[in-house]
């Protein structure tokens, strides 16, 4: 028995894509084809699971396995993780017929961080792309988080998600972003005590400039990029400017959490279930200057101002409550929103892959070029958007902007223009200088 195990180990640790010697007994082992059935783990695969956990080996079986030429290549240098290096072949008739044939490849930075710890499991479960869409997760960490990243991959292994067909971990964005169709950029340095906003813009801006360059070089040319790491609007602008091959439209800064927070407050005040609140726009920056729009929002299809007649509350309490919600939560929790942020990332992605309900819209920080509201087009600015569900979107025109909204939207625009000047050196512009309004503008989590 011991000899058999040793022989089997020796075979499994052969160099990538060499055939196993003892393939006759392991007909159901197959590696990394693009379509796989649900997990039914053969004896050989169980062995592989133990032997390969934490290793970076790819092996193939000469029986039933794709030849190296047929097998899709792994992103160069990135590492498939443990059980995800091994795919269990099923007989044709056992494969779930309903599954889509092509994987969706999602790259996530800051993958060992708190938000990702919620998000990855939602994506793997099918919550974003549906119960028929196999997914691959390419996880980006750093020297700091190498071990933690393996821990994340181990938890994904142990979760037995049938739709999760590949997990790749690595610390080089040029490897991890390869062929990504979605890039969720979450990793960013948190602002520490005494750190100026200008320093944060520069430090994180450098991360997003580097990641933009990597996406430009190796990601799918139509990759959808959702920037979460703060300050997310300007980080998204930097990322976009460093990725000229990717359409500007494909870059988003996450303001969906702010929209969800606004809906929650309106529902609470009106005494309705929050599903009845629609047409909520967050205008501007994901910062304390953001403008949650109650003027165009609706409750049960009626203008909010007709349903909530306490207009003083709308103007004087609702707006600051939403703007500072993140900071209040940090004081309670001792860390920033993570679970609700992950939920809002899922919402933001679903808004692009599912048609927007007729008459409604959603908020996203998008490149404002050609917007119908006269806002500086060279900013990533949160605007009302709608989608046909094809991954693309359009800015919704025709919303009413009164004096109250205009003044606040202008303030957020000025803040983003000032942020853009601070990062001129990262977006290929000259004569940058950092003079943020009020000396030092604040994230929702900073008060
Ligand atoms: N847009 C929005 O609505 C929201 C945005 N956020 C923002 O999302 C980001 C991530 O939040 P969260 O997951 O809770 O944060 P965590 O601190 O848990 O994780 C952040 C990750 O960022 C990475 N990172 C990159 N560069 C640095 C650096 N220089 N120093 C330290 N860590 C770095 C780290 O991963 P690694 O070592 O692998 O690089 C770390 O795991 C933050 O910027 C936060 O402000 C949070 C809530 C809402
Ligand atoms: O400032 C932070 O990290 C938290 C944040 O963005 C939010 O809660 O909206």
Image (cartoon, grey):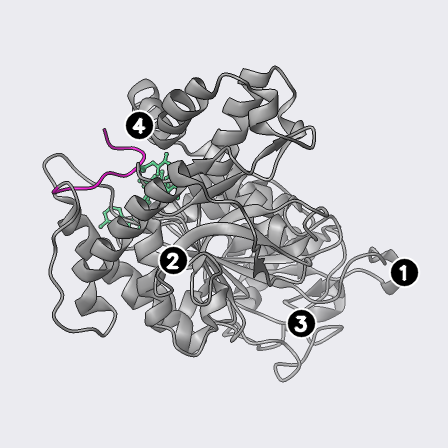
Q: Which residues are magenta?
A: 439-447
Q: Earlier in the sequence, mark 4 or mark 2?
A: 4
* 3D distance between C-alphas at marks 2 and 1: 56 Å
Residue 63 visible in the snapshot: yes
Q: Quadrant of residue 289?
A: top left
Q: Position of residue 287 (x, y in %)?
A: 32, 40
| Lower sequence index among marks 2 and 1 | 1
The residue beneath circle 1 is 93
In the image, is the residue at mark 4 within 8 Å of ligand 2 by its beta carbon?
yes
Q: Residue at the far right: name it.
A: 93
Q: Residue at x 79, y 60 (%)?
A: 90
Callout 4: helix, strand or loop?
helix
Earlier sequence position, callout 1 versus callout 4: 1
Distance CA(mark 4)–CA(mark 3): 54 Å
Q: Magenta segment: does it hold 446? A: yes
Of residues 357 and 219, the one nearer the viewer is: 357
- The residue tagged 4 is 327
- Mark 3 in CB contact with mark 1 (< 8 angstroms): no
Residue ID for mark 2: 375
Q: CA distance from mark 1 to mark 4?
A: 53 Å
Q: Residue tagged by mark 3?
A: 61
Instruction: From the image, state whether disc 4 or disc 2 is nearer to you.
Output: 2
For disc 3, the neighbor class at 10 Å (few under 14, some 14 to 19, many from 20) is many
């Amino acid at each position: 028995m011991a000899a058999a195990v040793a022989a089997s180990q020796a075979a499994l640790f052969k160099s990538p894509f060499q055939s196993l010697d003892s393939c006759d007994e392991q007909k159901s082992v197959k590696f990394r084809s693009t379509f796989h059935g649900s997990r039914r783990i053969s004896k050989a695969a169980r062995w592989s699971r133990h032997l390969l956990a934490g290793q970076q080996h790819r092996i193939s079986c000469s029986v039933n396995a794709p030849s190296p030429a047929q097998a899709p290549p792994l992103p160069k240098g990135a590492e498939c993780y443990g059980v995800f290096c091994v795919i269990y072949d099923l007989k044709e008739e056992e494969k779930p017929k309903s599954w889509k044939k092509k994987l969706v490849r999602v790259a996530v930075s800051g993958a060992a961080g708190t938000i990702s710890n919620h998000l990855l499991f939602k994506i793997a479960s099918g919550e974003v792309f549906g119960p028929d869409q196999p997914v691959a997760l390419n996880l980006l960490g750093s020297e700091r988080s190498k071990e933690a990243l393996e821990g994340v991959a181990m938890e994904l292994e142990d979760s037995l998600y049938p739709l999760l067909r590949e997990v790749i971990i690595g610390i080089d964005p040029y490897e991890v972003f390869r062929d990504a169709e979605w890039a969720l950029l979450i990793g960013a340095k948190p602002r520490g005590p005494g750190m100026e906003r200008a320093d944060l813009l520069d430090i994180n801006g450098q991360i997003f400039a580097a990641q933009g360059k990597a996406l430009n070089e190796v990601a799918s040319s139509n990759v959808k990029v959702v920037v979460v790491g703060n300050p997310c609007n300007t980080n998204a602008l930097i990322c976009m400017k460093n990725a000229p091959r990717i359409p500007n439209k494909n870059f988003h800064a996450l303001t969906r959490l702010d929209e969800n927070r606004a809906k929650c407050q309106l529902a609470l005040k009106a005494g309705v279930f929050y599903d009845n609140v629609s047409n909520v726009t967050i205008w501007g920056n994901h910062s304390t200057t953001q403008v949650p729009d109650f003027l165009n929002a609706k409750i049960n299809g009626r203008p909010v101002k007709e349903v909530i007649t306490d207009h003083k509350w709308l103007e004087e309490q609702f707006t600051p409550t939403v703007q500072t919600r993140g900071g209040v939560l940090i004081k309670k929790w001792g860390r920033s929103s993570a679970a609700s942020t992950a939920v809002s990332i899922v919402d933001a992605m679903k808004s692009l892959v599912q048609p927007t309900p007729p008459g409604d819209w959603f908020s996203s920080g998008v490149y404002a070029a050609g917007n119908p509201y006269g806002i500086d087009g060279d900013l990533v600015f949160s605007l009302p958007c709608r989608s046909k569900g094809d991954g693309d979107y359009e800015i919704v025109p025709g919303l009413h902007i009164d004096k109250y909204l205009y003044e606040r939207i202008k303030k957020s625009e000025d803040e983003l223009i000032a942020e853009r000047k601070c990062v001129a050196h990262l977006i290929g512009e000259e004569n940058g200088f950092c003079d943020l309004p009020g000396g030092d503008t604040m994230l929702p989590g900073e008060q």
